[in-house]
Every structure is written in structure tokens, then in C-alpha cells.
Amino acid sequence: MPRGRSVGDETADDGRMTHNYPRRPWALIAACVVLVLLAGVLWNKWSTARQDAIRLDRELKRVYKEAEDLRLQAALAQERITKLERELRALHAERERLMKPAEEKPKPAAKSQPARRPR
């Protein structure tokens, strides 16, 4: 027997026993079912988003590593270019140094020996 009720409350006018059970809160049950479904959908979306975030984080690290490798290659190439330019300038200077004396050398006066007199 439910609390707060007396034996007299459960009998009808004709003497039969009536069962006045409280009504089930169908709106609350429906709300709980909707909440469970919503929680399941949100969990699925969250796990998918988390996996995407992990994948993007890995890809970002890979891209940063590739960018750093390219920066290193560019720096090494720039150093090599600088070194080759220095060598090229040195070769041009050496070439001009070797070519300059040949052009600017005064021609030596031809030594003519005086004609010898026959004796």
C-alpha cells in the first residue's frame, strides 16, 4: 500500500479495490531517451573530432619538419653560392692579373749589335 493512503481510500463505492498507481512521467522518460541519444551522438562527434585533431597535429609537425629541412637546404645552397661567387671573383682577378702584364709590358728595345768591321 502506498504511503499516505488509508485502506478506505483504495476501495471504490461499490466495494471493489481500486489500484490508483501514480502515472508514469512519460515526458521525463522521453526526455531521458532523447538525452541518451544526444549524448551518444555528441560522443561520436567528439571522438571523430579528436581523431581529426590528432591527425592534423601529426600533419602539422610533418609540414614544420619539411619546412625546416627546406630552410636548411636553402641556407646550405646560399653558402655554396657565396663560396662559388668568391672563387669566381678570385679566378677573374687571377686571370686579369695574368693578362694585364702581357698587355702593358713595354716592348723591349731590340738590341742591335753594331755592325762589325772586318779586320
Image (spheres, helix red, strand yellow):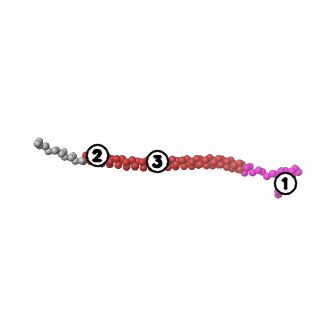
- Location of mark 3 (residue): 73
Q: Residues within 10 Å of mark 3 (few under 14, many from 20)?
A: few
The answer to whether residue 80 is left or right of residue 94 is right
Q: Which residues are magenta?
A: 1-29
Tell me, yes or no, whether the highlighted magenta stretch contains residue 34.
no
Tell me the tag on residue 76. none
Residue type (three-letter) at the residue carrying disc 1: Met
- Location of mark 1 (residue): 1
| Label 1 residue SS | loop
Say if mark 2 contacts mark 3, CB within 8 Å.
Answer: no
Say if mark 3 contacts mark 1, CB within 8 Å.
Answer: no
For residue 49, say whether it is visible: no
Comes first in the chain, label 2 or label 3: 3
Comes first in the chain, label 3 or label 1: 1
Point 54% across, 47% down: residue: 62
Between circles 1 and 2, the one closer to the viewer is 2
Residue 26: give x, y in percent of width and height.
Answer: 74, 49
